[in-house]
Amino acid sequence: MEHVINAENLTLSYGRDEPIITNAQMKITPNEFVFITGKSGSGKSTLLKSMYGELIPKKGDLNICGVNIKNITTSKLNLLRRYLGIVFQDYRLINDWTVEKNVMLPLLIGGFSKGVCVKQAQKLLKHVKLLHKADKYPLELSGGEQQRVAMARALAHNPVMILADEPTGNLDEYSSEVIWDLLKNARDHLGTTVIVVTHHIPSTLGIDYKHFFLESGVVYEVS
Amino acid sequence: MKSLKNHLSVIIPLFVLLFSIQFTSLTSKIVKNYSTKLIQDYSIVIVAPKTISQAVLKSKVSGIKSMEEISSKKILDRLKGNISSKNISLLKIALPKFYSLKLASFPSVKEIKRIEKKLIDSGLVTKVETFSKTHNLIYRIFQALKNISFIFSIFILVISVLLMFKQMKVWLLEHNERMAIMTLFGAPFWMKSAILYRLVIVDSFISTAIVSSLYIMLPRIDSINAFTKSMNIDIPKFELLKDTGILLGISLVFSLIIVSLVIRKMNK
């Protein structure tokens, strides 16, 4: 697969409203670390939503892992999403499930045995330094801890690509560092493509990355 | 507490629905049993100028189970003291034949009229007495009982469907966020909805168990027993496997259809 994301003349809008993204061109190759930046309301999250199929393009083409999502069926979209790891700014954890079960979610969907799911969830919770809170519920954790759980969940099934929407937006310095380390490790050790929507690219990251900048609905690649 | 309330919101309409279905079935069985009893006591009397063979009459009029001649010997014996034996012999020859007919099943008013007409039209019979006045009254009471319980069931069914739909929507709103998150990770339809299906399946089992227990206990309650005996009615025995199976089947089909409809509607 040459590109994990290939957008050509991509136009995105909600319903019949004015387009939020117009004629975007994007090519992202496997194992890249990509930042998408822009002012609030510039369409960063909208662009990310289209990458996990929550918003279907009005015009143009968007190929995700070789699948054109423009006319994708529900079952194919479900299948595609099983190869993605998504991290949201508001965590989106299932509040009546334990931390451990939340991390297990992508593995349960993938049909893995309970033993495998538990083992992998515990390994990841150890990585995010939350193994001691495996039996707690999300609302018993701080915001930073919840985001670390969300990150562990996104990594649980070794996804082809991680899509993170402002993953450190509301976090303290320590939790932010843990998140960036996990994303770097996923890229470096698992070969995962990482796409992060953010306001600011951390200066201490120390990695090569690709940068797309959004302004007035236009996507610019920053060289 | 919230979970109990959620379960009760489904168990109650399911219980009411199953109770009314079983009640209709019970009424129907009681009516059937009672009509079987009645048919044993009920007969039509016919008068014929000549002797009739049962086979001939059966071939001309359907619905007849058996025919028995009513002997005129008793009447003639009573007259022996007042009339000479010669006249008795003449009377014996001139007297028509009386028969009592038993029917195969408990007849409707329409059915009685049909049998009466067929008998007259056969040319074998000169007079028919159906005792239809008494019979009609009992038959109409039975029909009314059956119809009332049927209408009652339909009414309950509609109410139960509405209550179930309402509760399913409440459940879906409660589970909406979890289902949305699972959708984002590519969960298939059955997996997202599994918890709702599990809940209605559990509630179906509970409702069926309650209704079955109630109908098993019913004939053992003294006051009900006394009442049915006074009415000369036997309450049919609740067949644990058969009746519970039917109730469970109805409950599962009914609740699974409703939950599927609501989930599909919400997904759209």
Image (spheres, coloured by chain):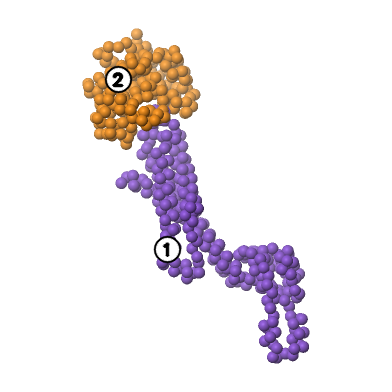
Chain colours: A orange, B purple
Q: Residue furthest front?
A: A115
Q: Position of residue B66 (x, y in %)?
A: 67, 68
Image side of residue B258 versus residue A127, left or right: right
Residue type, label 1: Arg
SS type, badge 2: helix
Q: Chain of mark 1?
A: B
Q: Counting other residues with Cα less than 10 Å from the Cα at mark 1, is it few (<14), some (14-19), or many (20 or more)?
A: few
- The reply to whether the C-beta atoms of the residues labelled 2 and 1 are less than 8 Å apart is no
Residue B62 image position (x, y, % from top left): 69, 63
> In the image, is residue A138 above or below residue A29?
below
Residue receiving disc 2 = A182
Mark 2 is surrounded, within 10 Å at the Cα level, by few (under 14), some (14 to 19) or many (20 or more) other residues, namely some
* Residue A203 relative to residue A193: left or right: left
Q: Residue at x 33, y 28 (%)?
A: A119
Quadrant hosting residue B166: top left
Q: Is residue A37 visible?
A: no
Q: Amino acid at mark 2?
A: Leu
Q: What residue is shown at x 35% (from left), y 12% (from top)?
A: A210
Q: Which residue is mark 1?
A: B220
Chain containing mark 2: A
| Quadrant hosting residue A156 | top left
Distance from the alpha carbon under mark 2 to that under mark 1: 69 Å
Give the number of the mark in front: 2 or 1.
1
Q: What residue appears at the point 49 percent right and 56 percent down from the top-left corner?
A: B239
Name which residue lies at 44% across and 55% down: B212
Total marks shown come to: 2
